[in-house]
Amino acid sequence: MIDDQELINQVLEGNLMSFTILVKQYQNLVFSILIKILKKEEDAEDVAQEVFLKVHKHLNKFQFQSKLSTWIAAIAYSEGLNYLKKSSRNLSHGLNEDIDNFNFSNETPHWILEKKDLKRYVQFLVDQLPVQYKTVLTLFHLNEFSYQEIQQITGMPEGTIKGYLFRARNLLKTKIENHSILFHETSK
Amino acid sequence: MKQVNDSIIQEMLSSKEITQDEFLTKEEKVSLMLYQQVVEAIQAYPNPAIKNDFSSIITEKIVHKKTRRYQIFLNFLIVFLTLFSFTAFIFFINSDMLYMVKTVLFQYKWIFLFTITMLTLIQLFDANRISIMNKRISL
């Protein structure tokens, strides 16, 4: 892993090979954020391209006031939301959901129940959560960003982030509690 | 009461202080275990499926954008120079000058024709060579 500062300097000097390294270093992060927001992999890929083109265009404005990963994640989050807002077909699954009264669907795919795979079941539930919940959850637990970094990425106040995290984890725990008998074998 | 316990358990989970769970009741320990399972499941998300050439697609787009910007600049320059030359030609033209231009053109017509033909051929060969090279790279 090359140092971010060195990598940025090389990219700003016009070295495209260094930019390829930068893309490879952060593509998993960008895709993981975009897939949570957009669901479809094809949409995520299109927007990820736009994100990295924007990163290349505005890299000279990056002042190291945050980590490069936080800055790139913030661009990915904002581009993802913009795409979601523009795409009218996704509005019903987008930001307008009543997140305070959210309930999981009662249907569980039979392959999850058959395999008794708790991890896949939780991931299936996470994917059903409203965009704000699942984005904050994955940024915190999967990408390991701090509350302050998530605040920089999403623009949400720290209290809101903590609230979303608490409620999302609570919803997931309650749901798997109800299914604990089903998954008893795997949780042993 | 349960709400408070729940938030404490979640706080323990976030700060990774889960080794100190002696003071928890049996019910709270089950709760903590379930929360741990939730977190472990989120951390176990598979890496997104990304095309192997994703980074190359990005760099190609950057190169394409830069080339396009340069071409637009060149086109503007050509249009500007043509308009400028045309205006200057209209401004300075008179019958003597027209006669002079005509004489020069007829006197050196073979040189003019040869130069234009050669330039066109060079352009064609160059375009052909670039397309062959691009095909080889893509293979």
Image (cartoon, coloured by chain):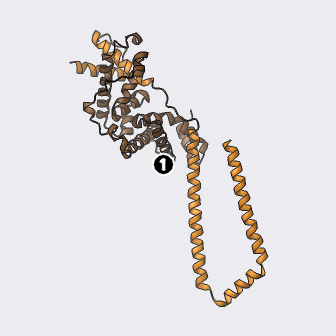
> Residue at the spot x=29%, y=13% of the render?
B28
Q: Nearer the viewer, residue A90 or B71?
A: A90
Q: Which chain is orange?
A: B
Residue B79 sits above or below residue B70 on the image: below
Give the residue at the far front of this rendering: A110
Give the residue at the far bottom of this rendering: B95
Question: Residue B125 at x, y = what percent?
Answer: 74, 58
Quarter of the figure with residue A2: top right
Q: Is residue B47 left or right of residue A133?
A: right
Q: Nearer the viewer, residue A43 or B66?
A: A43
Question: Residue A107 at x, y = what percent?
Answer: 34, 24
Q: Is residue B40 visible?
A: no
Quadrant of the drawing holding the C terminus of chain A: top left
Q: Is residue B98 left or right of residue B42?
A: right
Q: Nearer the viewer, residue A58 or B112?
A: B112
Task: Give the colour in which the image draws chain A.
Answer: brown
Quadrant of the drawing holding the N terminus of chain A: top right
Q: Report which residue position mark 1 lands on.
A: A58
In the image, what residue type sits under mark 1? His
- Indicate the chain on which mark 1 is placed: A
Q: Is residue A5 left or right of residue A113?
A: right
Quarter of the figure with residue B29: top left
> Residue at the spot x=71%, y=61% of the render?
B123
Q: Nearer the viewer, residue B71 or A128?
A: A128
Tag 1 secondary structure: helix
